[in-house]
Image (spheres, rainbow, N blue to C red):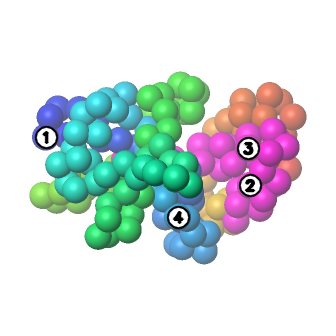
Amino acid sequence: MTAQDFEPPILVGGGAVELYSNSAVTTGDFDLVTARQESLEHIFRSLGFVRPSGPGIATRGWMHPDLKLGFEIVSSTLLDGLADRDRILLVDLGADGIAAIIAVEDMIADRMGQFASGSAPEMREQARRLLTLHSDADRAYLDRRIREETAGEYGIEDL
């Protein structure tokens, strides 16, 4: 994507949690955010990724048949525009470009938002684990983001 002068897609969701937890929490696929979905899908195709199809297949993502890796583009906007894009972690991969990963504070806040929705009670424990592993997190920013993601129902003290 950077070779085309586009921002790199941002890793979010379980893949980011796995990275930030040093694989203490594992995932089965990788969720990405990009405003350039068509361009990223073209890159996926050129690298041999396919969209699984057929009876019993319910995925919106891309799979690599040999690598057994799955990617899904989940949004065109990072956390509905609430995340501070200056906090995105950029990892230089040399000739392979740049990997962009959602900030750990935003990942914790997102997990708390899912917990607060009532649909994913296990997300609170993931948020707690991430905060324990990242005691250097910006606590003021994190508290604000948790409150935004939970409509004021929760804050950092609830971790």
Q: Which residues are magenta?
A: 100-129
- Label 2 belongs to which residue? 123
Task: Indicate the amino acid at tag 4.
Answer: Gly
Choose top left, top right, bottom left or bottom right for residue 95.
bottom left
Which residue position holds label 4? 28
User: Which comes before the other along the chain, label 4 or label 1?
Assistant: 1
Circle 4 packing at 10 Å, graded few (<14), some (14-19), many (20+), is few
Q: Secondary structure at mark 4?
A: loop
Q: Amino acid at mark 2?
A: Met
Q: Position of residue 132 (x, y in %)?
A: 69, 66
Disc 3: which residue: 114
Relative horizontal placement of residue 41, taking residue 117 as reference (left or right): left
User: Which numbered marker is on residue 128?
Assistant: none
Who comes first in sequence, dot 3 or dot 2? 3
Residue type at mark 3 is Gln
* Vertical order, 100 against 135 (above or below): above
Residue at left offset 74%, top offset 55%: 123
One can see residue 78 in this view = yes
**Residue 3 shows which numbered tag?**
1
